[in-house]
Image: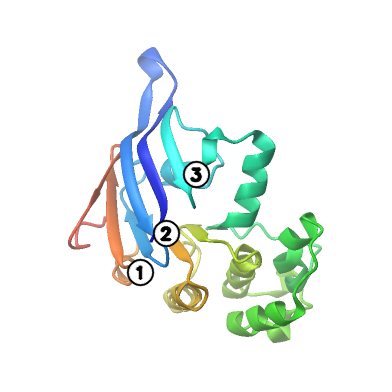
Amino acid sequence: MEILKTINLCKTYGNAETKVDALKEVNLSVNQGEFVAIVGASGSGKSSLLHLLGGVDEPTQGQVIIDNTDLYSQSELELALFRRRKIGFIFQSYNLIPVLTTEENITLPMLLENKKVDKSYIEELLDVLGLSDRRKHLPSQLSGGQQQRTAIGRALINKPSIILADEPTGNLDSQHSKEIVDLLTFSVKKYNQTLIMITHDLNIAQKADRVLSIKDGALWQQNGVNFIE
């Protein structure tokens, strides 16, 4: 079942001599439960695409439709609420709140909406993330891999339909990178979520159900992943 699609999605920055077409009429369809990897050189438009899919930047033209909702036809408040409830973001930088514990950082999205935290779910999440014994630790007391797992927990706490990950293993060594990707693929299968990930890592891309390449703002599907730079 289709969970996300874009229709003639374009993003342009600047004008005249400074005009840059970051995205050019991108048409994309992603099914529920699918793991899609997006690859391409720096400056190719990967992050611009992910930001538009997540509702954090506005397209110059075109539509992003998630769960039958046109993102950019909503008001600013409606979009903010939709984004918080339906989309989980994972970035290369962990963006944890330094004065909050692991558990508090994970449950922060729930608290922002004045929602009661499901104790059984947070226990399950901490166990799956391997953070049960680190729940009361501050970010400064965690390793890089533990901080990234905390960021993943925060992205998962609202049980989003879609997880958008922008180079989530970029700051980690190969062993921690493997652990993070294994964890994300496990979560996608366990909770029937959709994962769209930007990566430069060939080994990570090979684990995806589908690999898309982006170059000069244009997107297409590849049958192999040997083209990754």
Sequence-first tag of 3 and 2: 3
Q: Residues within 10 Å of mark 1 (few under 14, many from 20)?
A: some
Check whether the beta carbons of the residues at disc 2 and disc 1 lie within 8 A of each other.
Answer: yes
Q: CA distance from mark 2 to mark 1?
A: 9 Å
* Amino acid type at mark 1: Ile
Which of the image's four quarters has the C terminus?
bottom left
Q: Is residue 109 above or below residue 124?
A: above
Q: Which residue is mark 2?
A: 197
Q: Quadrant of residue 108?
A: bottom right
Which of the image's four quarters has the N terminus?
bottom left
* Amino acid type at mark 3: His
Q: Which residue is mark 1?
A: 204
Helix, strand or loop at mark 2: strand
Residue 105: mark in rendering:
none
* Amino acid type at mark 2: Met
Sequence-first tag of 1 and 3: 3
Left or right of residue 138, residue 65 in this image: left
Q: Quadrant of residue 93?
A: bottom right
Q: Residues within 10 Å of mark 3 (few under 14, many from 20)?
A: some
Q: Which residue is mark 3?
A: 51
